[in-house]
Image (cartoon, rainbow, N blue to C red):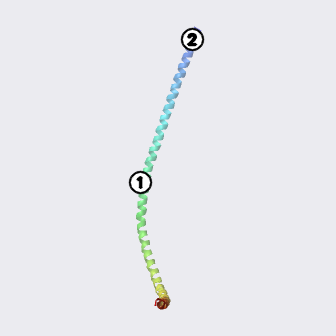
Amino acid sequence: MKFSLIAAVVLLALAQGSFAQEVGDLEKLGQYLEELKNKMTLELTEIIRNQDLTNQAQTFLEDKKTQLEPLASQLQDQLRTAAASVEEQIKPLAVNMQAQIQPMVDNFQKQMEALIQRMTENTQPIAN
């Protein structure tokens, strides 16, 4: 009888341990599902934020573009004015430079023509 009592206690202990292990597994499973739910919530929130961030960036760029267009127009006008001013200052210098160089070019051209004329004169007697 003592033996059967001991066997019954051992069986109850084993059964209790087996149920305790299943409860532990269920708790682990519940904890895993909770972590999975939290992770999915975080990822979904991040996706929504990223889409919102994209929209904000696009709005920001459009706003800056509309703000910069008048500035770009002003800058372009200023560059045109500066280019016209530089052209006005350089044009007289170019005319003056051309006036100084033109006699030298004419003189060089005359010398070359004279040289070619002499060479032509010298080659005619050889041909005869």
Residue at 54% x, 17% y is: 12
Q: Which residue is mark 2?
A: 5
Q: How crowded is the residue under tag 2: few (<14 C-alpha within 10 Å), some, or many (20+)?
A: few
**Dot 1 lies on which element?**
helix
Q: Position of residue 44 (x, y in %)?
A: 44, 44
Q: Nearer the viewer, residue 107 or 44?
A: 107
Is the residue 4 above or below the residue 61 in the image?
above
Q: Which residue is mark 1?
A: 55
Tell whether 84 sits left or right of 10. Answer: left
The amino acid marked with disc number 2 is Leu
Residue at 58% x, 13% y is: 6
Q: Position of residue 100 (x, y in %)?
A: 50, 89
Q: Position of residue 26 (x, y in %)?
A: 49, 29
Is the residue 63 above or below the residue 120 in the image?
above
Residue at 51% x, 26% y is: 23
Q: How crowded is the residue under tag 1: few (<14 C-alpha within 10 Å), some, or many (20+)?
A: few
Of the residues under marks 2 and 1, which one precedes in the sequence? 2
**Dot 2 lies on which element?**
helix
The amino acid marked with disc number 1 is Asn
Q: Nearer the viewer, residue 46 or 101?
A: 101
Q: Nearer the viewer, residue 77 or 121?
A: 121
Residue at 42% x, 50% y is: 51
Q: Position of residue 118 (x, y in %)?
A: 49, 91
Q: Nearer the viewer, residue 1 or 83?
A: 83
